[in-house]
Image (tube, rainbow, N blue to C red):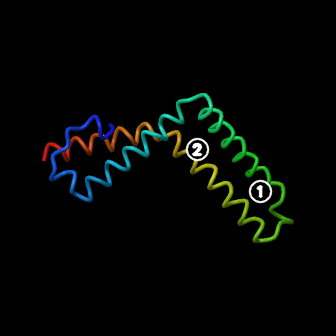
Amino acid sequence: MTKQQLNIPKEKRDDPEFKGLLQQADKLHDLSALASTEGGKALIGLLIKEAVYCVHRLRSSYRTATHPELLATIAELGAKIDTATLLLSAKESEEVINERLEEALRE
């Protein structure tokens, strides 16, 4: 739901919590749109492949890698999984935020 789709009363436009929900909805809409494109789908696939590569790297080097190297690989793995998850769940998250916006408008 974009700002243009809403008939927002003035008191809601001035409410910081409502503004925050609108900003979240806009960001999630953009992420959802990206995830549904061919490029977005390719990006998600690449992130998953790279996460699997990180797991292989951990598996093959856990005995010889230094502690900082292991931590760096784990951080890289987490970032790739988090980014893929964000893109994959954007549409559902957008729907939840839109429901919250509609509830707030009815109040």
User: Left or right of 104: which side holds 43?
Assistant: right
Neighbour tally class for label 2: few under 14, some 14-19, many 20 plus, Cα within 10 Å: many
Q: Residues within 10 Å of mark 1 (few under 14, many from 20)?
A: some
Q: Nearer the viewer, residue 86 or 10?
A: 10
- Circle 2 residue: 84
> What is the C-alpha distance between the residues marked 1 and 2?
20 Å
The residue at 60%/32% (across/down) is 41
Residue type pointed to by label 1: Leu
In the image, what residue occupies the spot 32% across and 48% down? Answer: 22
- Give the tally of numbered discs: 2
- Which residue occupies the foreground of this view, 35 or 13? 13
Q: Position of residue 37 (x, y in %)?
A: 56, 29
Q: Position of residue 59 (x, y in %)?
A: 79, 54
Horizontal relation, residue 16 to residue 54: left or right? left
Q: Residue at x 75, y 65 (%)?
A: 70
Frontmost residue, 52 versus 30: 30
Q: Amino acid at mark 2?
A: Ala
Disc 1 versus disc 2: nearer the observer = 2
Which residue was labeled with disc 1? 58
Q: Quadrant of the N terminus?
A: top left
Q: Nearer the viewer, residue 52 or 93?
A: 93
Quarter assignment of residue 16: bottom left
Left or right: 75, with 57 as reference point: left
| SS at circle 2 | helix
**Residue 68, percent from left and from top:** 75, 71
